[in-house]
Image (cartoon, rainbow, N blue to C red):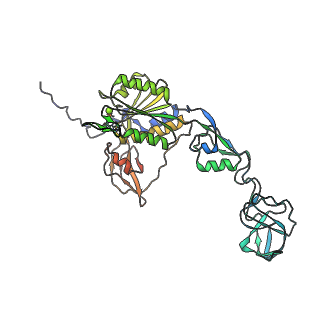
Amino acid sequence: MSLAPPPLRNDCFALPAGVDWTPVDDALDHLRRNLTAVTAAEVLPLGQALGRVLAEDVFAARSNPPQANTAVDGYGFAGPAGEGPQVMPLSEGRAAAGLAHEGEVAPGQAIRILTGAALPRGVDTVILEEDVTCDGAQIAFHGPLKLGANTRRAGEDAAVGDRILTKGRVVTPADLALASATGLSELPVRQMLRVGVLSTGDELVEPGETAAAGQIYDANRPMLLALLAKMGFDAVDLGKAADDRAALRRRLDAAAEAVDVILTSGGASAGDEDHMSALLRESGAMQQWRIALKPGRPLALGIWQGTPVFGLPGNPVAAMVCTLIFARPAMGLMAGASWAEPQGFDLPAAFEKRKKPGRREYLRARVRNGQVEVFKSEGSGRVSSLSWAEGLVELADAAAVI
Ligand code: AMP
Ligand code: MG
């Protein structure tokens, strides 16, 4: 019997029918609705809190500034000052940052005052030293000057009891400044989400090993581990597993004990050697998503012994795009952070493209001279394109001519 190739389908150049493809937004909504924080809370000194997710809202323990003070070097007095030339006798002493001036400045008098100094009693207005002549006994300047000029009100930045930071926020260097300025020495944060990374495939060899014909070096694991660390997760190297179902099962069992989330790459489609998708299906909670996404299919999602598993595609480009678009916001929620939408901008395109309807596309891109360039090839095995790119162009699900 001769074997004939299958007949051409009349939709062979179109996408498979849209009905059973999950739009990217539906997939994201699903994750957003179903995932919650899994990490425990702890209290850390400010010096260790950078990059952590806040477990609670944070309130100022002290006002910033704590007292009204001067924003400039100059002379303080009771304002306002009227139009025209002003002459004021100088009061004894001076007020400097950290050195409270105990005395009261009498009405009509001025006192030498330095940036950051609390305003002495009797002072509510400061004239800049550059605008003043001084002979040691009195000062002269040209009015008018408004009441409160060149001063900062007590609590104008943050008042004691104000909510300064909200739960779910990832602590930034500036947040540490704000917390410290408002009298805090520690922050309520969540422990880091532990994310395990496992590569699968008989063809993979480790960096430094000798690669035989047909073998390739593992590109996904170093990339994903580094990406996760940069995202603020505790990235755990789970090594690589062969295309062997029993072995893979044992690896997943051990990983589920050790980490909060598992990212695997490879073996996520429906082929003979696609053991990840087969195992996740077997585990019962398998969601095999045919997401209307390019590149990025197939993404296998499941729960293995209570631990969520993202079965990423093996192709490095697809693995990275799926991590950025799906795994990142999902892991963020599990880490206790608020849902993070990637920031997008409309920019002039330095490329042309006709896009078919039906699935969302992400192109490896970078911005040069205010225009978006895309990589010369859309191949999903092009590791060099990931290194070249600095971001992604997102093309909406509908058809488009760019
Ligand atoms: P798979 O999803 O297992 O069918 O793999 C799809 C493609 O990605 C194949 O060409 C694999 O060799 C390749 N691939 C899978 N895992 C990796 C990896 N960790 N690093 C580089 N390429 C990989
Ligand atoms: Mg494979």
Left or right of residue 185, residue 329 in this image: left
- Whether residue 146 can be seen here: no
Instruction: Name the quadrant containing residue 150.
Output: bottom right
Q: Horizontal and vertical percent for residue 128?
A: 73, 69
Q: Horizontal and vertical percent for residue 139?
A: 80, 74
Q: Nearer the viewer, residue 100 or 26?
A: 100
Q: Nearer the viewer, residue 224 or 94?
A: 94
Left or right of residue 27, residue 164 in this image: right
214 is higher (above) or lower (below) than 111: above
Q: Nearer the viewer, residue 6 or 145?
A: 145
The residue that appears at 63% across and 48% down in the rendered structure is 176
Left or right of residue 17, residue 324 in this image: right
Left or right of residue 327, residue 134 in this image: right
The residue that appears at 64% across and 44% down in the rendered structure is 46
Image quarter (top left, top right, bottom left or bottom right) of the N terminus: top left
Instruction: Name the quadrant containing residue 284.
Output: top left
Count how many numbered circles sit on residues in the image.
Answer: 0
- Whether residue 14 can be seen here: yes
97 is higher (above) or lower (below) than 199: below
Q: Horizontal and vertical percent for residue 77?
A: 81, 67
Q: Horizontal and vertical percent for residue 270?
A: 32, 29
187 is higher (above) or lower (below) than 126: above
